[in-house]
Image: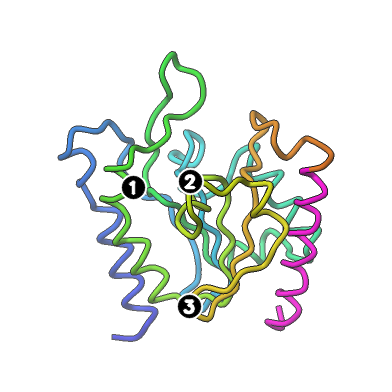
Amino acid sequence: MTRKEKLAALLDQVRACQKCLEAGYWIAPGAVVRGAHSAKVMTIGQAPGPTEAVTKRPFNAGSGKRLFEWLGEAGFDEDSFRAMQYMTSVTKCYPGKGKGGHGDRVPTKEEQALCRSWLEEEIDLVNPRLIIPIGKLAIGLFFEAAQTLETIIGKRYERDGRAIIPLPHPSGASTWHQKPANRALVTKAIRLIAKQREALGL
C-alpha cells in the first residue's frame, strides 16, 4: 500500500472507532480529521466542537476564523492550507457540552489515552516537518504540565527532527490571547511559523 492508501485506511478505522462509547463516555461519533498524506504542516487541536461535528471540517466555527487569521499573518491561505496540510486533534469526536451546558466538555485523560494511538499513527504516516499544537491539551502532548503558556508560546522547538511551534487556543471564550503581553507572544509565534513556512518552500 502507498502512504496515501495507508492513511486513508487509518482514517476509515478512526471514523469507525467506538472505544470511547464502549468505555461509557458520551461523544458524537464520527472523527473530524482532514488533510493530505503529503502535508508538511500538521495542526493538532483539542477536540471537534458542535459545528465541526456536523460539517466534519476542523476549526470551522469562530475559533477557526481566528486561527486562520493567525495563519494568514504567517502567509498561509485558508483554502490552500485545508487542501494541502493536515488538521487533526487530540481526540477525534465531539465530546459534548461541559457541565451546566457552558462550553464544550474537555476530554478526560482516559479518552485522550484511548485516542492517542490514532494520533501517533497519523504523525508517523503524514510525517509533517512542522507541528502546530493549538491550546493547552495539545501543547501538553509535547511539554510538561507544569510549564505555562507564557513560557512556551512564541518559541520554536525541535522534537524527533520536527519543528514544534505552539499556539494558544483561539477561542473567543479564552482571555489568554487577548492580553497585550500574551498577544505579543502570539505575534512571535506567527513570525516563527512564517519563517518555517518559507524554509519548507510553502
Residue carrying label 1:
112
| Residue at image location 30% in from the left, 67% down from the top | 10
Q: Earlier in the sequence, mark 1 or mark 3?
A: 1
Quadrant location of the N terminus in the rendered image? bottom left
Kindly indicate whether the residue at mark 2 contacts the one at mark 3 (C-beta within 8 angstroms): no
| Residue at image location 64% in from the left, 63% down from the top | 165
**Structural distance between the alpha carbons of marks 1 and 3:** 21 Å
| Residue 91 located left or right of residue 195 | left
Q: In this view, does 160 lie above or below 10?
A: below
Q: Is residue 68 above or below residue 170?
A: below
Question: Where are the magenta residues, as a range?
Answer: 182-202
Kindly indicate whether the residue at mark 1 contacts the one at mark 2 (C-beta within 8 angstroms): yes
Callout count: 3
Q: Residue 84: in sight, yes or no?
A: no
The type of residue carrying mark 2 is Leu
Residue carrying label 3:
160
Q: In this view, does 17 lie above or below 40?
A: above
